[in-house]
Image: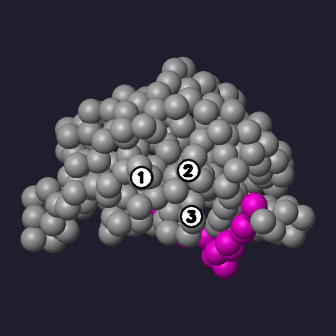
Amino acid sequence: MFADSISIVIPAFNEEATIVSVVDEARDVLKSLTRDYEVLVVDDGSTDQTGALAEELARADAAHVRVIHHEANKGFAGAIRTCYANASKDWVFLAPADKQVDLSELKNFVALTNGNDIVVGYRKHRADGVRRELNSFVFHLLCRIFFGIKLKQISTSKLYRRALLQAIPLQAAPSSAMIEPEVIFQAMRRGARITEVGMNHYPRAAGKPKGTGARMIFNTFGEMFRLWWVLRVAPHSSPEAVPAPARKS
């Protein structure tokens, strides 16, 4: 068994068809890995039954399932910000609510935690079409150019050391997908030890993708340039580099 505790955090917006099975899967995986765990669902202003279903799960297993509700939708970065700020265990694993990730693969992330602060997953193949593949390629290419992030991908599941994650003052706008590049970039500046692991990727089980609209893409690239200016061009606007938290013995 893994000696440290783990939070699986799940941002969810209108995922009523999958939220129950995802939370159940998360609990089953966690109990096989560690004795101390939680599943944290952030209902990001859903207009369907996502929030109500998550509440039922939390009432049935209050020791391991928590739910936080946004009264209105705060967007991708807003939901993940709430996930990260409220996770309570030693390690924080970001998981989607759409079943495109097999959560049993968390064991592969845990196996790489010794000596590392972040384990970043990358899709060994992509299961949702050429358009998203192209968007992802351009996004990661620009992250490499503007932020020096040379990882294969940063837009899927990741396992973070919570002490590091919660020490980073995030500035990404809620309407963009830039929270993940910002976390990785600021962690790199703090000397974080980062490794990668391949993972499988599956077609969406239900619902609609949330990050493919023209407005979302436009906002993301606009926010990328803004963060590049704030974090790299105007150093007086960004926090001083500090060392990563010491690993637990």
Specify few, some or many for label 2: CA neighbours under 10 Å numbering under 14, 14-19, or 20 or more: some
Pick out the residue farthest to the bottom: 71
Kindly identify which residue carries mark 1.
248
In the figure, residue 2 lies in which quadrant? top right
Name the residue carrying label 3: 87
Please state if 185 lies on the left or on the right of 220 as rendered.
left
The span picked out in magenta is 64-77
Q: CA distance from mark 2 to mark 3?
A: 14 Å
Query: Helix, strand or loop at disc 1?
Result: loop
- Which residue corresponds to the image point at 52% horizontal and 52% vertical from the top-left? 91
> What x and y, as percent, mark residue 107?
61, 33
Disc with the residue nearer the chain's start (2 vs 3): 2
Decide: few, some or many residues near mark 3? Use Cα within 10 Å; few <14, some 14-19, many ≥20: many
Q: Secondary structure at mark 3?
A: loop
Mark 2 and mark 1 in contact? Answer it, CB < 8 Å.
yes
Q: Could you give the CA–CA distance between mark 2 and mark 1, rounded to whole angstroms?
A: 9 Å
Q: Earlier in the sequence, mark 2 or mark 1?
A: 2
Q: Are marks 2 and 3 in contact (CB under 8 Å)?
A: no
